[in-house]
Amino acid sequence: MAEIDRYRPEDRRAVEALYRRVFGHDAAESSRLRWEWQYRRNPNNPGHEPEIWIAREGPAIIGQYATMPVKLSVAGRQVQASWGMDVMVAPERQRQGLGEMLFRTWDRNVGASLGLGLSESSYRLFQKLRWPDVGPVPCFVKPLTRRAFRRPNWPVGLNRLVSALTLPVVKIVARTRPLAAEVRMIDRFDDSFTVLWEELAPKFDLAVRRDAAYLNWKYVHAPHVRYSIAALRRDEQHVGYAVYRHLHEPRGRVTLLVDFLADPADEPGFATLLHWVDREARNADSDKIRGFAMHAGFRRILRRSGYFQVKSSLEFVVKVNGVDLEPSFYDTTDNWHVTLGDSDQDR
Ligand SMILES: CC(C)(COP(=O)(O)OP(=O)(O)OC[C@H]1O[C@@H](n2cnc3c(N)ncnc32)[C@H](O)[C@@H]1OP(=O)(O)O)[C@@H](O)C(=O)NCCC(=O)NCCS
């Protein structure tokens, strides 16, 4: 009979071996590089004890649920929540109810349990256990060159034809626009960003608390990727930020708009940040910019700034336990703020 309890330091090697069996060598290596930062240095993990649940059978480890604690602002309250991330069950023990035990143990211990960008098997299990399904988080793409519309699974001829046909559209949306407020690159988030978060939090019905400690951990100290951070300033104060990075994909170069914050009603402000990212993306020779946004205000400004909504695979489930909410809370997500930077999606 399996037992579920918390991760202990001596579990590390057995967990790594199981991870390799379930997710493969490359994923295991990249998880190993992130591990200390991801599980021990999270500022929302006060005792620095990883919030990981382990399924044991005698001395053997047959499953885990590794999570990322965050403070979640929900309908004006703050709850201790966590993103469920690396969940796995030993292949020979799958579909025997262990996953369900892990999901339920995690959920019983948090004020809100959140899942983003799920695999087919975990998405099905969340559905079976009736977690509210509020996704996917809408995906937006802004084309910058005619290569933006290429698809890795299309033949070269078709890609060329589509590039030629879409060129006029690209020329219009990709034109340079003037910046309406001051934007500065920063190396780290100072305390003024905590103040900004406190000011903006009431605007969101649901969002992870983006204070300076969280932002520095997530976007300045991440060991596996390097981010650029642009701060939006007005009247000598920080009124927003955007976090982005450039990468190569099989059919071209992409700038990822990973995370951002501004008043969603401040169209000139958020649009200025977007125009800044446009310039950076062009300087980096990117063919397109891709970002994810849930809030209706941000989505509108993205569309007005030349982004197109495309099919999203960023599934999102959330179950709030720590605050009494009407079931209808999950029906209206227009004021929720969720981006690609949430959970550990940008690996
Ligand atoms: C996700 C996972 C942890 C579930 O663990 P489990 O012990 O198999 O889950 P349970 O036995 O408690 O629940 C089984 C339910 O999960 C879902 N499920 C599990 N594996 C599935 C699969 N391969 N395809 C579709 N649904 C699946 C189904 O809803 C299933 O119910 P059913 O058997 O009645 O159809 C396990 O499948 C796993 O390790 N998957 C590989 C790693 C992974 O994808 N992790 C998620 C990363 S986001």
Image (cartoon, rainbow, N blue to C red):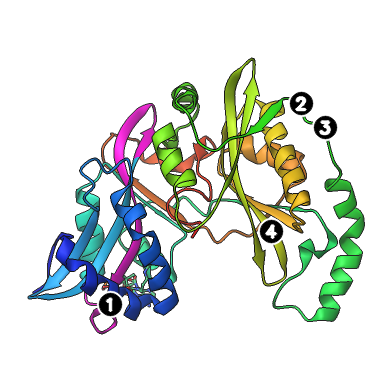
Q: CA distance from mark 1 to mark 4?
A: 33 Å
Q: CA distance from mark 4 to mark 3?
A: 22 Å
In the figure, is residue 146 to the left or right of 249?
A: right
Q: Secondary structure at mark 3?
A: loop
- Looking at marks 2 and 4 on the same chain, the residue that comes earlier in the sequence is marked by 2
| Proximity of marks 2 and 4: CB atoms separated by less than 8 Å | no
Q: Residue at x 89, y 51 (%)?
A: 171
Circle 1 packing at 10 Å, graded few (<14), some (14-19), many (20+), is some
Q: CA distance from mark 3 to mark 1?
A: 53 Å
Closer to us: 23 or 221: 221
Residue lying at the far front in this picture: please name it.
187
Q: Amino acid at mark 1?
A: Ala
Closer to us: 321 or 34: 34
User: Residue beneath label 3, please?
Assistant: 178
| Proximity of marks 2 and 3: CB atoms separated by less than 8 Å | yes
User: Residue beneath label 2, please?
Assistant: 180
Where residue 163 is drawn, which disc sits there?
none
Q: Residue at x 24, y 45 (%)?
A: 110
User: Residue beneath label 4, please?
Assistant: 254
Q: Main secondary structure of the magenta part?
A: strand
Q: Amino acid at mark 3?
A: Pro
Q: Secondary structure at mark 2?
A: loop
The quadrant of the picture occupied by the N terminus is: bottom left
Closer to us: 114 or 186: 186
Vertical side of 49 occupied by 182: above or below: above
Is any part of residue 89 visible from this angle?
Answer: no
**Is 90 a magenta residue?**
yes
Q: CA distance from mark 1 to mark 2?
A: 52 Å
In the figure, is residue 161 to the left or right of 192?
A: right
